[in-house]
Amino acid sequence: MRVTSEQRLDDGVVEREFTLGEIPGILWTPASVPAPLILLGHPGGLRKMYPRLVARARHSAAEGFAAATIELPGSGDRPRSAAAEEARADLRRALEAGEPVDDEIVDRLVLPLVDKAVPEWRAALDSLLSLPEIGGPVGYAGGVIAIGLRLAVVEPRISAALLFAGSFVPRTMFEEARQVTIPLQVLLQWDDEGNDRQLALDLFDAFGSKEKTLHANMGGHTGVPRFEGDAGNRFFARHLK
Amino acid sequence: MRVTSEQRLDDGVVEREFTLGEIPGILWTPASVPAPLILLGHPGGLRKMYPRLVARARHSAAEGFAAATIELPGSGDRPRSAAAEEARADLRRALEAGEPVDDEIVDRLVLPLVDKAVPEWRAALDSLLSLPEIGGPVGYAGGVIAIGLRLAVVEPRISAALLFAGSFVPRTMFEEARQVTIPLQVLLQWDDEGNDRQLALDLFDAFGSKEKTLHANMGGHTGVPRFEGDAGNRFFARHLK
């Protein structure tokens, strides 16, 4: 892990850009360290996502959490995969035509992404947990929900997850969902037209966790209400402190 | 409204039992008054429900809210209605036989209850709002959800409602749900076997409110997690203060 830039934001949060091999990432640490870490999931494209990610990181830092994220495979400046680009184009065509999205397209798009991204997040976790600023349990917050789901199953260092039910999940991963046992908070935008609400409810039902909470709100795909940021902080304060 | 007893609880909350004509009720006021008021809904039977009601009232008082409740028609020491008792027996038979509950039974049980209870809650509100200890906007919290729903439609003094989706709602009231416009937080116990989950989700979908949030949790019918008490306080703090 190589730090490529460092700056102190006006609220005392230290922001470090880093690279992990070819993968760019960002780490935010609060004024008081060592701090428990929240991994910030996102749909890919760190530069485009930066304003929302830094806002989420600062909100978490106000509650005493560090936050970190890495670029997804095939997004931002990372090399594209021809197969993923083709699946993405097929998905876009189906959505634009108003057709139901074929399970086969979702499998082609999401499964290779999960298979590639999850080991990268785990490698990032190895590096991040070796830093003196990071201590205590780890949480995962955000989309891509299939990545969070797989991480919750395979990565024992993740103690709680706040998942955004706003993207496609391969049907084959419902079996994995039953293996999840960590506390979960699942966010669902009820009136998100690009999202399959019934699939999100079925997935929430499938999770094996004894403590799982669904928060459904209005406001469309990107309109998660501000108060959910506070609710997320309280969820992690219950489980990471 | 006639106060029949008054005591100060150890956290400084003043508890007053009262009667409103033949209807018994309880009012809890916090140390600092005047305070906004939360009406506490419940399934009927004040004496049996008292431990849970006083716990909810004290939790609300800690956030600066007064709370009040009245006995439901046909519950506690109030006179029974033969028709309601018959509908309740029919419901019990259907549930014990594991049969789906007929809409006709729900209508016979719930509609007359709503028709009778709602004017009583509104009369209680008239009396409560005339007290110097009560000031500011009013919220409704709890079941019976059909009573909260009707109150949200017909009573303009209620500014926000936290509804427990744990009881039957007549299908004919879905049209009323579309007329609800106040902010809502709906609690659903996901694994409540005595509750029709799909009906609760359909009802949440039907509510006309632009701000509506669904909180689904595990823990069975009476197992609402403690943290939902805090979430309820924050919901009302956003809308009643």
Image (cartoon, coloured by chain):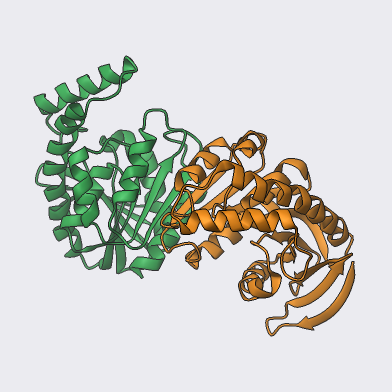
Chain colours: A green, B orange
Decide if residue A238 is on the left or right side of residue B184: left
Q: Residue furthest bottom?
A: B10
Give me the residue at 17% from left, 41% from top. Answer: A172
Q: Is residue A109 above or below residue A139?
A: above
Decide if residue A142 is on the left or right side of residue A173: right
Foreground residue among B203 and A90: B203
Question: x and y percent of residue A173 in the render?
Answer: 19, 44
Foreground residue among A204 and B35: A204
Q: Is residue A143 above or below residue B138?
A: above
Q: Quadrant of residue B67?
A: bottom right
Give me the residue at 37% from left, 56% from top. Answer: A13
Q: Quadrant of the C terminus of chain A?
A: bottom left
Let me know if residue B237 appears in the view: no
Decide if residue B123 is on the left or right side of residue B167: right
Q: Quadrant of residue B136?
A: bottom right
Foreground residue among A143 and A146: A146
Question: x and y percent of residue A127 in the render?
Answer: 15, 59
Question: x and y percent of residue A156 in the render?
Answer: 18, 63
Let me know if residue A63 appears in the view: yes
Decide if residue B189 is on the left or right side of residue B34: left
Question: x and y percent of residue B29 in the render?
Answer: 76, 71
